[in-house]
Amino acid sequence: MRMILLCGGGGKRLWPISNNTHSKQFIKVFDDGNGGYRSMLERAISEIREIDPDTQVTIAAGRVQTEEVRSQLGFDVSLTEEPSRRNTFPAISLAASYLKDHDKVDPQEPIVIFSVDSYADHSFYECLFSLGEIVENGTANLVLMGIEPDGPSDKYGYIIPASSDPVSAVREFREKPDIETARKYIEQEHALWNAGVFACRLEYLLKRADIVFGSSSYAYLIQHYPELKQISFDYAVVEKEPNIAVKRYNGTWADAGTWTSLATLLNNGDVGQVVRDDQCSDTLVVNDLDIPVLAMGIKGAVIAAGRDGILVAEKDRIPDLKSVVDKVWLEPRIIGKRYGGKEVLYRTDSSETSLLTIRAGSSVTIKTDVGVRKTLTVLRGAGEQMKPGTIFTIQDGEKWQINADTDIELIETMIEFEIEPEED
């Protein structure tokens, strides 16, 4: 069995902690059990490996996010890079074609597909593995996970099963309803929330890609990706498939992609350096800065402080955040790198000063363009020909190789300068 983990979401719903490269699935807000924090992505991979360390997971992420994926997971997971955002079916098709053409996976292999931006307990990940077993041993072309609702909700689509058995055929699907209609679905038809979790054989995905895009070749899909039809997996596959089964899941599962949902999951707690008085209640405070945030008398709100800005909002205004944040959207200042990370400290039209963090054992090539000078000052750590206080300058297309013996922090100052014309 293989898994495809969809990890290509954007960064506006959790602004200012997230941005287009350091998006919601990468922010570290969940307790790691060791006094620190981990991201949605790290948590999902950790849960899967706890069940079966040998399960192969392919991450489907945007090209701008691959550095961040490598920064958090290293190189021991496979990764497909989406050249642009084209919705879930193109992303899944690209990953499936990669499994076929690059990893040479057997077309009969069960594939489980799920998204990273939900919060669930350990039993959810155990259920993922059971979906693969149902595909392996059953006759359905497609197997879904259906969430047992804890109450009526207008946030999710609904699966109407043919029976109340743990695994059942699917009778039909319903779009997101109003609350009263949702209550009737649950009471009268044993309806389940559609979690966007799918399982099928690899061959099935490839055939659907052939139908929708004209080819399931990785070379074709990657070349034509920006032109592929922008369509969800639900519309391209699920709604057209008559032979579908659903597996019931009745454990913890929740959307983790907005500040409102995170406030519930984190029990309106604190992340980072936060001090609050006893009059501050029903409020989530997340601080990604290295200075404290003091909250006094704030009720029913979200406070988030990050390198890209500061958010102070009443919870009932959070649904409007994505549209409002366009007014203050800046170039990202936190950028994950496969060797560590980059934080932009100061930026002008012709210069940029950044803090680079390089993990021990990494090898990094610092490059410049013609007309650009970079000065690097080592603050902490050691590597080949460098120690704290070492300063070196490169310019006009030069390169400098850094081999980190320990974790290294350095300041990089980049300045563009005019090139004087050569004299005749």
Image: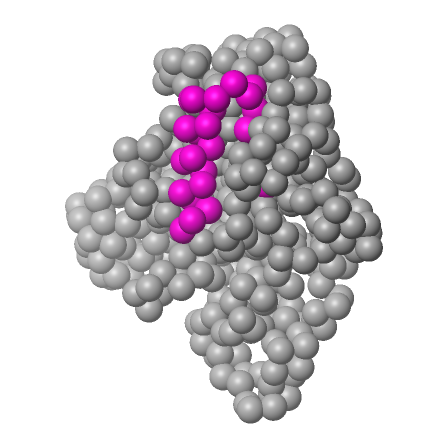
Question: 233 or 242: nearer the eye?
Answer: 242
The quadrant the N terminus occupies is top left
Residue 48 in which image quadrant: top left
Q: Residue at x 48, y 22 (%)?
A: 138
Q: How is the image coloured?
A: one colour
Q: Residue at x 51, y 74 (%)?
A: 269
Say if residue 391 shows up in the picture: yes
Question: Is 133 colored magenta in this rendering?
Answer: yes
Question: 36 or 232: nearer the eye?
Answer: 232
Q: Is residue 24 left or right of residue 45?
A: right
Q: Where is residue 152 drawn, in percent x and y?
A: 72, 55
The segment highlighted magenta reads 122-146
Question: 117 or 80: nearer the eye?
Answer: 117
Residue 179 in which image quadrant: bottom right
Q: Is residue 173 left or right of residue 396?
A: right
Q: Residue at x 42, y 22 (%)?
A: 136
Question: 372 or 275: nearer the eye?
Answer: 275
> Which residue is situated farthest in the bottom direction here?
278
Say if residue 6 shows up in the picture: no
Magenta: main secondary structure equals helix
Q: Where is residue 133 drawn, in percent x and y?
A: 41, 28
**Image height of 235 relative to 32, above or below:** above
Q: Residue at x 43, y 22 (%)?
A: 137
Q: Where is residue 413 drawn, in percent x and y?
A: 43, 53
Question: Is 174 colored magenta in this rendering?
Answer: no
**Image height of 188 relative to 132, above or below:** below
User: Exactly how many numbered labels are in the figure?
Assistant: 0
Q: Where is residue 17 drawn, in percent x and y?
A: 55, 60
